[in-house]
Amino acid sequence: MKPIVTFYRNDPNAPKTTMPAHLGANAIIVDGNKILLEKRRDSDTWGLIGGGVKKWEEPLDAIAREVREELGIRVAKEKFRKLAVYGEPGRIAAYRDGSIWRMVIVAYLLELPESTQLKISKESKQLHWFTAEQLQEISIVVTHSDIVEDWFIKGNEYPK
């Protein structure tokens, strides 16, 4: 069965957008040298926790909501640290319904103990903590892979 969404990043074969740019918020959730990823139902790939920013939301409000919805935990907005905005035009999400969006992602850091009780949402198949070495063995959403790579390269070198 065709996936609900296919992601592209700087791919010359990506379809042309049919919709306006879409703002998203995603979290790099870490505990020491591990990062939390979800196995997504819509694409059967691993990705960051997060999603779309609603018309009435700030990105920070959106990531706090997404963490609550996708992990079942409430986290104060002050616990998130904005890392970077990923907005190059080649970041595309093509949905099975024919809508094709350019994605602009605001990435946040959240430090969370691995022992935190997390709930898998209906959007996810699985949650798992990964080391940098383990990431080489999995398929990561291409629009998230550079964000994850940047974290393991830059880490706390991001501006505070």
Image: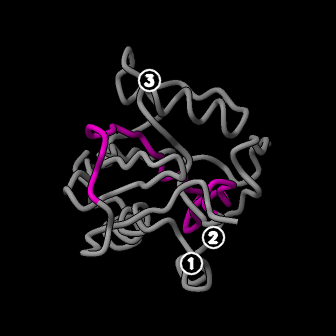
Amino acid on which the number 3 mark rests in the picture: Asp
Which residue corresponds to mark 1?
Answer: 135
The local secondary structure at tag 1 comes to: helix
Residue occupying the point 69% across, 45% down: 123
Q: Main secondary structure of the magenta part?
A: strand
Q: CA distance from mark 2 to mark 3?
A: 26 Å
156 shown above or below 103: below
Specify the label residue 72 is tagged with.
none
Q: Pick whichever of labels 2 and 3 is earlier in the sequence.
A: 3
Q: Pick whichever of labels 1 and 3 is earlier in the sequence.
A: 3
Which stretch appears magenta? 16-43
Image coordinates for residue 90, horizontal then vertical, percent: 24, 62
The local secondary structure at tag 3 comes to: helix
Amino acid on which the number 1 mark rests in the picture: Leu
Colour scheme in use: one colour
Q: CA distance from mark 2 to mark 1?
A: 6 Å
Q: Nearer the viewer, mark 2 or mark 3?
A: 3
The local secondary structure at tag 2 comes to: strand
Mark 3 surroundings: few (<14), some (14-19) or many (≥20) residues within 10 A: some
Residue occupying the point 26% across, 44% down: 160
Residue occupying the point 40% across, 61% down: 143
Specify the label residue 130 is tagged with.
2
Q: Pick whichever of labels 2 and 1 is earlier in the sequence.
A: 2
Which residue corresponds to mark 3?
Answer: 61
